[in-house]
Amino acid sequence: MEQNQPLRTQQTDFVQEKHFGLTARQWRAVKVFLQALLYLSPSIVLFAAFVFIPLIRTFEISAYITDPIGRLAKFIGLLNYSRLFDTEVFVNSFQRTSLFLAYTVPVTITISLGLALLGNLRLKGIAFFRMVFSITIAISGATASLMFLYIYHPTVGVNYLLSLIGITNMTWLVDQKTALLSVSITTIWLQIGLNTVILLAAMQTIPEELFESAMIDGANSWNKFRHITLPMLSSTFFFLMVVDMLAAFQTFTPIHIMTSGGPLESTNLLVYSIYREFYFNGKYGFAAAQSIMLFFIMLILTILQFVFVERRVFYE
């Protein structure tokens, strides 16, 4: 007992020792936090320089009228925001963007699911098939847009093939009825590769025991797909839905290269409208207000998905 007494006294003194008014336990927690900040500091600096500071600056610019070279001239508060839904360009851009999301997001996920199911089959040469459908991951948006410009060319590409069966005069990119759909097809093609790889990886994590048990119970392929595969992929579907929606909102390159917002503003999505208002029309405050509105639209839709859609998601 007497030998253990000095050890207990040292432990008590260590616990009661204070650093800058903190106990030893609190001081260790502070050191761990500071060490974590040190490791995160490169990312924090980059996010501050390219995300947080520009966002704050955009909020500031949106509350002003600017001169032709972008200097803040007159404070007008929320006037730029109140003008948004009274401006035909913004209303049209919002409608076009909503339609673009309806074209791209569900179709991309559906096609990707079909390709993932094919890629998950145990067939000879399936590795080559997987490589083919995933190759779009390595293709940039600019390259894909140039490829589809030739595909939609009036005399070559898909129009030439259609002419062989008697279908002519398909003006894909110069008709306001088909231009947005044509750009949507390009965007879908770009997104399919990554979505398919993600879904295929998720499928391969589903335990085989579930399918074996269902087979013993007499379940056919459709029942196994409906009651096992789809529920087990629900978290992946939710992830892809959020990511694809945000990517669709930010689509710029195909619009810029293929249509420049035309014809007749039929492909003038919100991001491209902001670009034109800022760089061509010199309406810096109004463009900033549009970008803030786009930010809040994306934020609200993402929150709604987490609140209402995630409830149906099954996490293993």
Image (cartoon, helix red, strand yellow):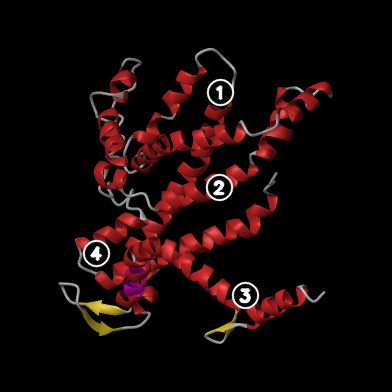
Query: How far apart are the two marked residues, 4 and 1, measured between alpha carbons?
Result: 45 Å
Residue under pointer 4: 278
Lower position in the chain sequence, tag 4 or tag 2: 2
Residue under pointer 2: 239
Amino acid beneath label 3: Arg
Q: Which label number is shown at residue 210?
A: none
x, y percentage for residue 293? 41, 67
Q: Are marks 3 and 4 in contact (CB under 8 Å)?
A: no
Query: How far apart are the two marked residues, 1 and 2, measured between alpha carbons?
Result: 21 Å
> What is the magenta range?
54-59
Q: Is residue 187 above or below residue 297?
A: above
Q: Which label number is shown at residue 118?
A: 1
Q: Nearer the viewer, residue 232 or 221?
A: 232
Q: Is residue 56 visible?
A: yes
Secondary structure found at label 3: helix
Mainly helix, strand or loop, the magenta region? helix
Question: Looking at the image, which residue is at 45% across and 52% down?
Answer: 246
Question: Looking at the image, which residue is at 53% across and 45% down?
Answer: 240
Of circles 3 and 4, which is in front? 3
Say whether residue 291 is left or right of residue 229: left
